[in-house]
């Protein structure tokens, strides 16, 4: 029932109280929750802005003989990063060295921009047997309310996933499954327009933010744009939550404070996350609100 259920059943199927789980921060907020439900221990590795890359030494030190699972979101929410082959290979080798499973959250697999390309982790040498690949019809087709996702892995792992799914939701409603089946059969026709439309939204939001004196970071994939807090926020000693509240009350724009996506680091207090998966009408209203503000 959506990719979120795939995340939950993978944690409950694979983890126990003595296990450790590596999560990259900023993270999708359901990862720590499902690790806690499985009574496992979370170990965060911080993606350092503005490029949102990991420190190789920090990543290697996070692994141990208790590392059972790694949650890896690529393209990454909320940073908008699309990880390179070299980065994916580095992570794959560490998973193999420590005999760890990898949950590869690829719900934004088709939403990459410019010359950035998504690399499915299960295709790397030695990774098929230890990778659970997750994706989402809701994200791919822009119908998140349908709640249809899928998890793909080797037979032994999918058997364990099905045992949890069986006693969790039992099954996804049939109508939504049929609708997603039609969509998947028409991907070749659908995806070019999908990418063009979202790239236009990405560029329009970026232009609006820059015109307002903000400095949006590059969005390589997903439909999120991160911005560092502007100088006015720093001078007023605002963190991300404070500035988010200011934007709502004074500008009329709602955005997300990323500090909620961190456990180990306070880096999230220095950014805001904007989402451009909105109607053109909403984006135009946001552009007008930004033009009428003074944020630089």
Image (cartoon, helix red, strand yellow):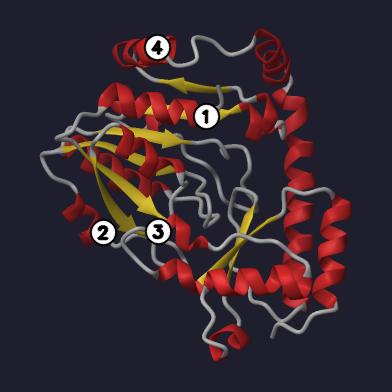
The residue under the point 72% across, 56% down is 202
Q: Earlier in the sequence, mark 3 or mark 2?
A: 2
Which class describes the residues within 10 Å of circle 3: few (<14), some (14-19), or many (20+)? many
Q: Earlier in the sequence, mark 1 or mark 3?
A: 1
| Above or below: residue 179 compared with residue 214 | above
The reply to whether residue 50 is in sight is: no
Residue 3 marker: 1
Q: Nearer the viewer, mark 2 or mark 1?
A: 1
| Above or below: residue 33 compared with residue 273 | above
CA–CA distance in space, label 3 to label 4: 31 Å
Q: Earlier in the sequence, mark 1 or mark 4?
A: 1
Q: Position of residue 24 (x, y in %)?
A: 36, 51
Q: Which residue is mark 4?
A: 162
Q: Earlier in the sequence, mark 3 or mark 4?
A: 4
Residue 56 marker: 2
Q: Determine contact: label 3, label 4, CB under 8 Å.
A: no
The residue under the point 45% across, 50% down is 83
Q: Which residue is mark 3?
A: 262
């Amino acid at each position: 029932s959506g990719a979120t259920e795939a995340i939950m059943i993978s944690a409950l199927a694979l983890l126990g109280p003595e296990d450790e789980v590596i999560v990259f921060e900023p993270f999708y907020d359901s990862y720590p929750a499902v690790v806690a439900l499985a009574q496992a221990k979370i170990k965060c590795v911080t993606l350092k802005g503005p490029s949102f890359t990991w420190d190789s030494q920090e990543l290697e030190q996070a692994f141990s003989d208790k590392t059972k699972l790694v949650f890896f979101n690529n393209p990454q929410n909320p940073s908008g990063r699309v990880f390179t082959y070299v980065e994916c290979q580095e992570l794959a080798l560490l998973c193999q060295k420590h005999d760890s499973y990898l949950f590869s959250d690829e719900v934004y697999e088709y939403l990459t921009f410019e010359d950035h390309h998504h690399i499915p982790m299960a295709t790397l040498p030695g990774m098929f047997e230890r990778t659970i690949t997750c994706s989402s019809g809701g994200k791919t087709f822009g119908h998140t309310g349908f709640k249809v996702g899928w998890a793909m892995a080797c037979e032994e792992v999918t058997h364990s996933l099905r045992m949890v799914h069986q006693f969790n939701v039992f099954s996804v409603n049939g109508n939504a499954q049929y609708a997603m089946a039609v969509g998947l059969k028409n991907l070749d026709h659908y995806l070019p327009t999908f990418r063009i439309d979202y790239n236009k939204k990405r560029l329009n939001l970026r232009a609006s933010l820059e015109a307002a004196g903000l400095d949006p970071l590059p969005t390589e994939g997903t439909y999120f744009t991160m911005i560092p807090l502007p100088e006015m926020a720093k001078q007023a000693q605002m963190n991300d939550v404070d500035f988010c509240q200011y934007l709502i009350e004074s500008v009329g724009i709602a955005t997300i404070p990323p500090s909620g996506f961190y456990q180990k680091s306070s880096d999230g207090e220095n950014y805001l996350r904007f989402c451009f998966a909105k109607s053109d009408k909403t984006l135009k209203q946001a552009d007008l609100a930004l033009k009428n503000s003074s944020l630089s």
